[in-house]
Image (spheres, rainbow, N blue to C red):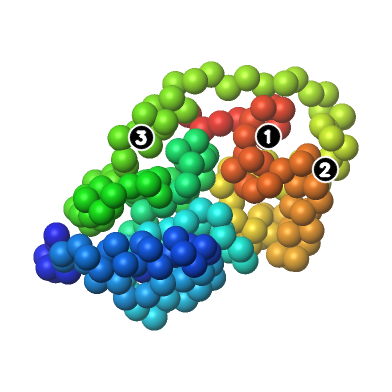
Amino acid sequence: MTARTTARVVVADDQTVVREGIVMLLGLLPDIEVVGSAADGEEAVRLVAECAPDVVLMDLRMPRCDGVEATRRIRADHPGTQVVVLTTYADDDLFPALRAGARGYLTKDADGDEIARAITGVLSGEAGLSPKIQRRLLERVTEPVRTVPQSPDEPPDGLTAREVEVLRLVAEGQSNPEIARTLHVSTATVKTHINNLFAKAGLRDRAQAIRYAYRHGLAQPPG
């Protein structure tokens, strides 16, 4: 598939049945060797440091460290390892993972041939996007962003000025440590602000937070 005949792969997914199923599927494919599997982003980052895989198949929604943050850390510290996102829903927000450095994006209903093509593609310097994801990406790029005007003195849902500032940095794609450095506070303080704004706005994850920031005019989408 590249100069090497076998692609070394790590699988990261917090659902045991899904993770083991992907590992089993990859084991049936030629020229692919699974060198590790992880139940969360922290473990994925550790396995990349230990095993130096060519590709990580990365779930987005995981405890401790989600797929976007794990992708950012892997691409920053181990640029020789490519990341292909595996997501349950085609309408998950694509941009945070792509900005973090993911080169491929598949849904979990992808078959073995589709996964193999994505792995081959990213190792060849191409984008490993399934047709379903390509259509969704095109829709997201071309659709207008509708914003709800807000008075700068009245943030939505009772957010404080500091929480709005943190939200803007989240929308820019910054990780918690990066936000902490920008604001000159501790990572623990950043986590507290994020937990508070998530609770006030009824948000589940960073992808929802980014859409919320765009919708309320608190941040501007790229481009």
Q: Secondary structure at mark 2?
A: helix
C-alpha gap between disc 2 and disc 3: 33 Å
Q: Amino acid at mark 3?
A: Lys
Q: Look at the picture and state if 21 lies above or below 94.
A: below
List x then y, in percent, for residue 111. Answer: 29, 49
Q: Which residue is mark 1?
A: 212
C-alpha gap between disc 3 and disc 1: 24 Å
| Residue 175 lies in quadrant | bottom right
Disc 3: CA contacts within 10 A as few (<14), some (14-19) or many (>=20)? some
Residue visible at 49% across and 67% down? 16
Q: How many marks?
A: 3
Q: Amino acid at mark 1?
A: Tyr
Sequence-wise, which precedes: disc 2 or disc 3?
3
Residue visible at 15% across and 64% down? 30
Sequence-wise, which precedes: disc 3 or disc 1?
3
Q: Which residue is mark 2?
A: 200
Q: Secondary structure at mark 1?
A: helix
Q: Amino acid at mark 2?
A: Lys
Sequence-wise, which precedes: disc 2 or disc 1?
2
User: Which label lies toward us, 2 or 3?
Assistant: 3
Q: Which residue is mark 3?
A: 132
Taking depth in this image into account, of 166 and 115 the one nearest to the observer is: 115
